[in-house]
Amino acid sequence: EPYPSLISRLVVNQSGFLRRLVRTKQSQSWLEIYSAPLDECDHYAVCGPYASCNTNNCACLDGFEPKYPTEWDHSKWSGGCVRKTELACQNSVFKKYNGLKLPDTSNSSFDASMSLKECQEKCSKNCSCIAYANSDIRNGGSGCLLWFGDLIDMRIYPDGGQDLYVRMANSTLGYLVASKNSSKNKIVAIIVIAVILVGLILGGLIVYLRWKKLRKQVEGGKDDMELPVFDLSTIVKATDNFSDDNKLGQGGFGPVYKGTLPEGQEIAVKRLSKSSGQGLEEFKNEVGLIAKLQHRNLVRLLGCSIPGDEKMLIYEYMPNKSLDYFIFDQTKSELLDWRRRMHIIDGIARGLLYLHQDSRLRIIHRDLKASNVLLDSDMCPKISDFGLARTIWGDQTEANTNKIVGTYGYMPPEYAVDGLFSIKSDVFSFGVLVLEIVSGKKNRGFFHPEHSHNLVGHVRRK
């Protein structure tokens, strides 16, 4: 036994999660080193044939459509997809898909000696061949994999994956459904128009009632603000009417624009999208929290604007954008030497320590990630986006929620599964962020040819 003092056990809980835990004879607690599935895409063939899984959602390959549209619309994807146009062997082409986990190989064959071009020629000559790919992606790719049946168990990797070439019909024509007779079309048109009119009337009434309710909430909320409230006209002028040229990026709750106030101060305007999911309470939560925080490693909130149903936050402008803009870009990452990366890690840690220990309120951020760390002109990191943050009081060290929010890949297991969060939740997110800063790779979407772990799992293996 290479580790005689190490005890390991595998546990399957009631939800079907597999966990591997270890402990030494000297230790009194178990340490989880692996759990599966990591997300919905880890389930075998969750999307059915000719569909790929991406961040817990399924999508048909181009040229295919759901086999059972009604079930598909209700996220029941196991039926998979079917071709829109049947294949004609001598009138087909191959479409390239990038960044995929290759399909199940139970109905495939391979030849390690063939090149990709030879692989294509062999598949083209065999009418039963559905797709082909390199069997070995190392050193530029070699070998040949051929599939002769339905393509199942595929997923998309944002970073990495392999190329798959799928046989498609050369023409996308032939899907048109025969038209019904003109009288039936007129009846259907009348019914559709009537339904649309009724829907518009009801929708308008609902919008009006919600607007009145929201206006009352906003007017009441202004009295609770501890920061300046900017007029809409000031923000519109500062951002040149929210022009695309001034758009800095897209945050979790809406777009962010650069602006310049009349006195010349540069600002960043976070304009909350109406479909973002952040309501007035979450907005007031973010304003109330940041207004009470003062630290060089936290982004400074200058004020807000809440005209009508609009909700905007006015921050100090960060000329170097967010951390993910640098560390996940192969060219820009070269600007971050090890000294500067350590400086950024140290600054994030100081900001977290302030939130957890030194501020007037003990605050759990709950969404610490690379895109929520902004960089000023001196590359000093500043933690931002407090819309999901929670306060804890007194000697309280943890809390529980039924609404899991945040970003998968940065969540600790006890929060993602049971809704239990604490300052340790931010520490876990910080650890993932440190790995990303050091490696330049995203935790979710990390791909390694020898295993299917994410970045955290890969580091544990090493």
Image (cartoon, rainbow, N blue to C red):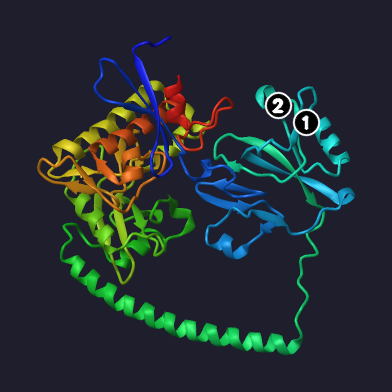
Quadrant including the C terminus: top left
User: Which residue is disc 1 drawn over?
Assistant: 116
Q: Provide residue 174's location: percent of width, then percent of height.
A: 80, 64
Q: On the image, which quarter does residue 154 sit in? A: top right
- First reached walking from the N terminus: tag 2 or tag 1: 1
Quadrant including the N terminus: top left
Q: Provide residue 198's location: percent of width, then percent of height.
A: 49, 86
Front residue of 326 and 43: 43
Q: Is residue 429 left or right of residue 453?
A: left
Mark 2: amino acid? Gly
Judged from this view, the residue extending furthest toward the left is: 394
* Residue at x 52% of width, y 62% of height: 74
User: Which residue is disc 2 drawn over?
Assistant: 141
Q: Judge whether residue 265 can be spotted in this image.
A: no
Q: Judge whether residue 441 can be spotted in this image.
A: yes
Numbered disc 1: secondary structure? helix
* Residue at x 71% of width, y 87% of height: 184
Numbered disc 2: secondary structure? loop
Vertical position of residue 440 compared to residue 192: above or below: above
Mark 1: amino acid? Leu
Q: On the image, which quarter does residue 157 sit in? A: top right
Q: Is residue 457 left or right of residue 266?
A: right
Vertical position of residue 296 compared to residue 59: above or below: above
Q: Do the CB atoms of the residues marked 2 and 1 lie less than 8 Å apart?
A: yes
Cα distance between the residues tagged 2 and 1: 8 Å
* Residue at x 59% of width, y 27% of height: 449
Vertical position of residue 167 compared to residue 446: above or below: below
Q: On the image, which quarter does residue 113 sit in? A: top right
